[in-house]
Image: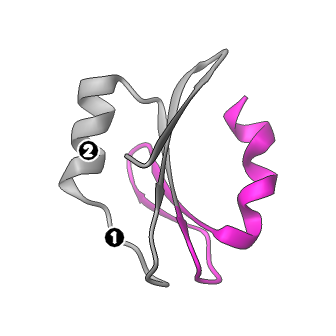
Amino acid sequence: MDMVVETSRGLVGFEFKAGPVPARTRSMLESIEDIGLRQVFVIHPGERRFDLGEKIEAVPIRQLATLRDEVQ
């Protein structure tokens, strides 16, 4: 996990990927379990926002600023 942010609703993790189509990884799933993350956002240079599974969502870097309301 590249960054973990503590919010009023729990811990949120961020992974930053260079590829335009990121995939869910075992380390993301382990971070959800081990650290107790309520959400993981995978920030990538692609154009689409999409789910990667339970509690994991891929978000284009252009939309990073819009996550503020979702994270708090």
Q: Is residue 6 left or right of residue 19?
A: right
**Label 1 Cα crowd, 10 Å radius (few <14 / some 14-19 / many 20+):** some
| Mark 2: few/some/many CA within 10 Å (<14, 14-19, 20+) | some
**Residue 41: x percent and y percent?**
52, 52
Q: Which residue is mark 1?
A: 23
Amino acid at circle 1 = Ala
Label 1: which secondary element:
loop
Q: Which residue is mark 2?
A: 29
Report the Cα–Cα distance between label 2 and label 1: 12 Å
Amino acid type, residue under disc 2 in the picture: Leu
**N-terminal-most mark, 2 or 1:** 1
Quadrant assignment, res 47? bottom right
Residue at image position (25%, 59%) is 25
Q: Is residue 40 above or below residue 21?
A: above
Q: Is residue 20 above or below residue 28?
A: below
**Span shown in magenta:** 43-72
| Mark 2 touches mark 1? (CB < 8 Å) | no
